[in-house]
Amino acid sequence: MNSVTDDTSDGLAELVAGLLEKAGQLGDAQAEGISAAANDHGGGCVPMDDLREACTLEVRNVLGALTGRTPLDTAICTEIGRRRARQEVPETTLVTGYRVGLRFVWELLIAEAERTGLVDHEGLVAAASTIWAIQDRVLEAAVAGHREATGERFRATEVERSALLEALLTDRVAEAGKLRATADVLRMPRYGRFAVVTTEVLGAAGRPCARVEQALRRVGIHSVWHTRANARVGIVQLAARRRLDELVEVLEGEAVRRTGVSPVYEDLYQTAAHLRYAEIAMLSGRADGCAVSVFDDNLVASAAAAAPEIARRLAADVYGPLDVLPEAEREVLLETLETWLACGGSTEETARRMYCHPNTVRLRFRRLAEHTGRSITEPRGITELVFALYALRQDPVARKTT
């Protein structure tokens, strides 16, 4: 940083010395100007006494550095930036306040130079260059402090929120005495309409929680998200009954892995129980798919996912005999049954969707019955075929389980 020329430095030093004698008064005046120009900086966020104290420190700091004889103490600016971040003053408001404050010092210098004659026009030009260089350093230090403290605050908030969410999801909020704090942090009421969403995560796969949260926010749905070992979990507040359909629609647009949605519940502290429903719904989808499954929409698939050991055993018993067939033929038989179920048991609609004749569908069902010993026309047989099919789609190796 360049200081003013030697020819005018003595006059400037004398002028500054006079101003420093009334630094407290000048700091108060500067604080009033900042408060008037940037209400967020002084009015609601920062107590006026705090603002006056900070302004007095900065007046002394800037005036002392202006002559080049005292180094600028950027640590003061950094600490003020940190303090404003803790007081939740926005960064833009902090910068506005500093610009107003430094303009105050510059206008003060001009007025004092005219009044005392200690600094001529050439000296003011040199001082202007110096004060703008000071402004750059002051702003850089203050913003750096603000961002550092903001980051610390954000991380601390995230740690607290994560801990409270985990306690809520594991039904330990009452034990931890955090019932009210959890609702406050989540910005959700104790009673309302809620749903839990779980999205499968494999390694580093999957989209960040923030993306889904933002997508829901765009349609006016509030949610909070938490990453666990193998899933991302969201607690969603549904303001109206139709919101469940909107929730599913948004999730379908974002899903890259299996996603499950719990039944709607009305007490926030029933979240842990409904997390289990959401997990079951997630696992009820195809293992290689990215479907959004709502627990109540397919209770048979949910039942298969809820009892994986029994489901695997049944799948092995029902579909294990198909292993004697070529892979392509085996898959056609399973796909035909799956399509038939989706068509509500209509052979004609199944044929239309699979681009074949209805007799071809019937022939495939006969082949399925020959190998599995179960027919779609017999109640127990169709029950076992359907249950085992869901189990097989949820766990493709299930039919090989012994």
Image (tube, grey):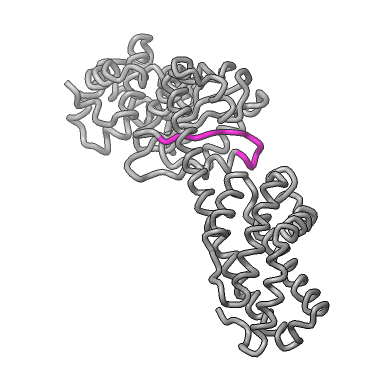
- 315 sits left or right of 43 in the view: left
Query: 4 or 316: which is nearer to us?
Result: 4
Query: 108 or 191: which is nearer to us?
Result: 108
User: In which quadrant of the rendered image does the N terminus lie?
Assistant: bottom right
Instruction: Tell me how many marks there are.
Output: 0
User: In which quadrant of the rendered image does the C terminus lie?
Assistant: top left
Q: Say whether residue 351 is visible.
A: no
Residue 308 position (above or below residue 66): above
Q: Say whether residue 289 is visible.
A: yes
- 2 sits left or right of 287 in the view: right
Residue found at x 54% / y 57%: 78
Q: Quadrant of residue 97?
A: bottom right
- 35 sits left or right of 3 in the view: right
Picture coordinates of residue 18 (x, y %)?
72, 70
Q: Quadrant of residue 324?
A: top left
Query: 39 or 25: which is nearer to us?
Result: 25
Residue found at x 60% / y 19%: 190
Query: 266 or 44: which is nearer to us?
Result: 44
The span shown in magenta is 217-227
Q: Quadrant of residue 140?
A: bottom right
Picture coordinates of residue 137 (x, y %)?
57, 69
Residue 128 position (above or below residue 352): below
Residue found at x 72% / y 82%: 124
Picture coordinates of residue 170 (x, y %)?
41, 21
221 drawn magenta: yes
Picture coordinates of residue 211 (x, y %)?
52, 45
149 drawn magenta: no
Residue found at x 58% / y 49%: 83
